[in-house]
Amino acid sequence: MKAATYRNNFWNQPYVPYPNAATRRQVLDKMIDRLLIAASCIGIVAVVMFLLTMY
């Protein structure tokens, strides 16, 4: 019977070697989420500024 092998690649390794530590993929996802929030805020501010100048 073949033993099941678990392939541990770079992205699935914990970012910090502690129990329940976030994996590198989770840290990357969180950074991307924050960049998306920042871009959305900048877009909203730009729209509000445009509407204020039109008024």
Image: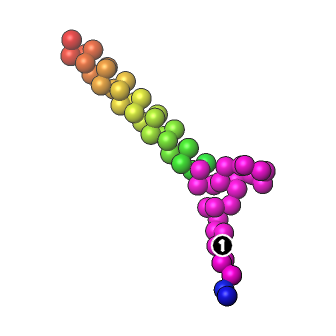
Q: Quadrant of the N terminus?
A: bottom right
x and y percent of residue 36 in the render? 44, 40
The image quarter in which residue 7 lies: bottom right
Direction from residue 49 to residue 24 in the image, left or right: right
x and y percent of residue 51 in the render? 25, 18
Between 13 and 38, the residue placed more toward the observer is 13
Q: Which residue is mark 1?
A: 6
- Residue 18 within the segment the image draws in magenta: yes
Q: Residue at x 78, y 54 (%)?
A: 17
The image quarter in which residue 23 lies: bottom right
User: Which SS class for mark 1?
Assistant: loop
Q: Quadrant of the C terminus?
A: top left
Q: Residue furthest bottom?
A: 1
Q: Residue at x 39, y 33 (%)?
A: 40
Direction from residue 26 to residue 18 in the image, left or right: right
- Magenta-tinted stretch: 3-26
